[in-house]
Amino acid sequence: MQDDPYGYAEGGFYFLSSFIRTFTADYTIYFLLISAITFFFIYKSLRVYCVYPLIGLCVYISRFLLDRNMMQIRAALAIAVIVYALQYVAERNFKKYFIYIVIGSLLHHSILLALPFYWFNKIPFSRKTICLAIAGSYVLATLFSPIIFDKVAAFSAIYNIAPSYTSDTSPYTSGKGLANPMIYYQVVVLLAYTYMERKLVNMTPYYQTIRNGYLYSTIILILMSSFASLSGRTSTIFATLEIFMIPTFFAAFKPKGKLVAFFGIGVVVAGFFYLNIIQ
């Protein structure tokens, strides 16, 4: 934002940048240090949540690295911090989770969207209620899309939050609506993860919190589908949980089916990497 003294609103990231610049003015070293901190939290999260951490890292590189770590370094770091903190949501330790929310929001304000998830995760979701939540989101997006668009745009204008993503004159505003293919991709991943619960719940750390977080992301993506960039930027925090979900699909297959699963998932992951490169 033009009125922000640092070029952006988050003073915490400015402090971190200033601290690094105290020791070096080399921009290559600066970016390497920011990346090192980000991947430290990614590494810790993969160790906590993921059955196959190496596969999870491959998913992260193909799905998020180019668009996030190489273009949105503040968001990448903040999301890595908050994903690591989701274990405290599962343990219902609000104090620790809130501390991480504060830290994350000082790096990127979008992290405040993760705060309501603490209470969202307390809802006892079943297969039926997850399907109803998805269907309800579609209905709301279909019937009330113009109202959602106007309310979000008005809120953005009043508080000067993400105006480049909601302004009528911005090329980043108008989205594909429910024609966005990412909606259907996330719905498929979510339903597959949900209907494999019996196979995965005992072998996947924090299964319910990961599933609920991805549901939270999918609902946001559907409801905000009228916006091009904003829908992705608001849903991407918990969309990151794919790096823990997709590797567990291997565990759901018997030894003979693992090769087929490896090939199928490999094609999807490679496809994302290719699409991110050509953008």
Image (cartoon, rainbow, N blue to C red):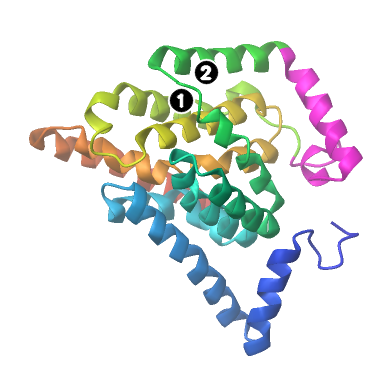
Give amino acid for label 2.
Ile
Span shown in magenta: 144-172
- The percent position of residue 102, horizontal first and vertical second, equals 66, 54
- Say what secondary structure mark 2 lies in: helix
x 48%, y 34%: residue: 214
x 20%, y 38%: residue: 251
x 73%, y 14%: residue: 144
Q: How many marks?
A: 2
Contact, CB < 8 Å: mark 2 with mark 1? yes
Q: Is residue 84 above or below residue 129?
A: below
Q: Check if residue 155 falls in the magenta segment.
A: yes
- The percent position of residue 147, horizontal first and vertical second, equals 80, 19
Could you tell me how far apart the alpha carbons at marks 2 and 1 are, in whole angstroms? 8 Å
Of the image marks 2 and 1, the number of the one nearer the N terminus: 2
- Say what secondary structure mark 1 lies in: helix
Q: Main secondary structure of the magenta part?
A: helix
Circle 1 crowding by C-alpha within 10 Å: few under 14, some 14–19, many from 20: some
- The percent position of residue 133, horizontal first and vertical second, equals 53, 17
Residue 237 in the figure: left or right of residue 244: right
Residue that label 2 marks: 134
x 45%, y 20%: residue: 125
Q: Check if residue 63 falls in the magenta segment.
A: no
Give amino acid for label 1.
Val
Give whichever of 267, 121 is nearer the camera: 121
Residue that label 1 marks: 187
Circle 2 crowding by C-alpha within 10 Å: few under 14, some 14–19, many from 20: some
Name the disc covering residue 270, or none: none
Of marks 2 and 1, the one in the foreground? 2
Residue 267 in the figure: left or right of residue 120: left
